Amino acid sequence: MPELKSFLIKVIRGGQDIPPMWPVLQVALDLTVLERALAIAEEAVRGGADWIEVGTPLLKSEGMDAVRALKRAFPSRVIVADMKIMDVGDLEVEMAAKSGAGVVTILAAADDSTVKEAVREARKYGVQLMADLINVDDPVRRARELVEIGVDIICVHVGVDQQMRGLTPLDLLKELAGNVDATLAVAGGINSETAPLAVEAGADIVIVGSAIVKEPDVEGAAKRIKEAMLTRKPIRAGRRRIREEEIREALAKVSTCNVSDAMHRKGAIGGFIAVLPEGKKMVGRVLTVTTMDGDWAKPVEAVDMAKEGDVIVVDAGDGRTAVWGELATWSCRVKGIAGVVIYGAARDLDEIRRIGVPVFARRFVPNAGEPKGYGEIGSEIVIEGQVVRTGDWILGDESGIVVIPKEEALEIVNRAVDVRDREERLREEIKRGGTLSSVLKLEEWERVG
């Protein structure tokens, strides 16, 4: 659609007759505080962002004032109002257009009558309508219908919650590029590695959120992504979604606090003494053990059954007699066991420190029991109300322990990385002279009533 591209490029360049720079980099400001959004947008524009998206969270938090403020701050840039219109298309397009938006989004799942009203209003005010295909059952068919109605841009979008499960928009983008005659946008976990792949697959507009706005150096991140888009060469991304085979590596780079936040405070177990080599964490798949207080037979036998990289988790009933010690820890080191958790007592604290295998125990005592052989290996256990199963993931650091159900591991790890990234950006803003309260505008967000 060359005529649309010419129009859009002219808008991008402030109406000046400058040769087009296609494709477009759109930065998505999915924030809740306008001041933060303005500062991040300024850095992103310096890094080469062409369009500025007022994300849905920002619109819900600040309303049309966010669109107005960004248009005043960046008059030569296209402002995208991510309205995600589902009903009353004419009114919502009018609101966004009058506030300064050059592009307004509508959900592809909206009724045709809503889309038609939105198209008519977009034509009236001279703005473009972008349809978001998120969660549409038959996206190719729907995209064709929307283009026929008059929608200007079709957006292939994999939402954040879907990204956490490892989904990507690139396959659908390729399918649409070969079957739909329209200007195409793509969104969903795009970074400097995947942005050039998106362009090669047919994207005219590449929408990037986290890989820019959560970076301490927003300008540098935007520059890398824009360069990758223009050269069609992937650049190693500092932030990207984690794949199944990367779970262990990713967990080693986040904290138990990050994971607990990602799990909405579930999975955490406190009250253990952590014996950790400096700078090291305990990460691995769980092998469970149940035993009686003082009976160290099954915990020691579990070392022979565990695989390299596993973590042995022993339920000794919070007992006072040691079921673990130096020699068992040496056995773990020889086998490559990643760590041990004792819900009960261990001993030989000084030697365990020297061995270097992470050990978490409720207490350390000098007295040990005897190898009677009661208990089981591999059965489900419950520690402080937290269910722990063989095959679950476990992370331990100086703050405590967190258990991640194996079925949810990929999603939770991605969410934990997201939490870490968000905190890194907040840390940078605090270092520039803010405080946590002032950056987050806590007084405005205190619960009413």
Image (spheres, helix red, strand yellow):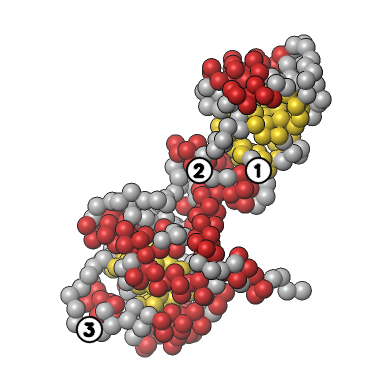
User: At numbered mark 3, what does the secondary structure look like: helix, strand or loop?
Assistant: loop
x then y, percent, for residue 96: 45, 82
Q: Which residue is mark 1?
A: 399
Disc 3 to disc 2, C-alpha distance? 47 Å
Give the number of callouts: 3
Query: Which is nearer the eye, 140 or 214?
Result: 214
Label 1 Cα neighbours within 10 Å, binned few <14 / some 14-19 / many ≥20: some
Considering only vertical position in the picture, is 53 above or below 336? Answer: below
Query: Which is nearer the eye, 191 or 185?
Result: 191
x then y, percent, for residue 32: 55, 70
Considering only vertical position in the picture, is 118 above or below 299? Answer: below
Residue 253 is tagged as 2
User: At numbered mark 1, what does the secondary structure look like: helix, strand or loop?
Assistant: loop
Q: Nearer the viewer, mark 1 or mark 3?
A: 1
Give whichever of discs 3 and 2 has the lower sequence position: 3
The N terminus sits in image quarter: bottom left
Q: Quadrant of residue 212?
A: bottom left
x then y, percent, for residue 159: 47, 58
Give whichever of discs 1 and 2 has the lower sequence position: 2
* Callout 3 amino acid: Gln
Q: Which residue is mark 3?
A: 16
User: At numbered mark 2, what does the secondary structure look like: helix, strand or loop?
Assistant: loop
x then y, percent, for residue 426: 53, 62
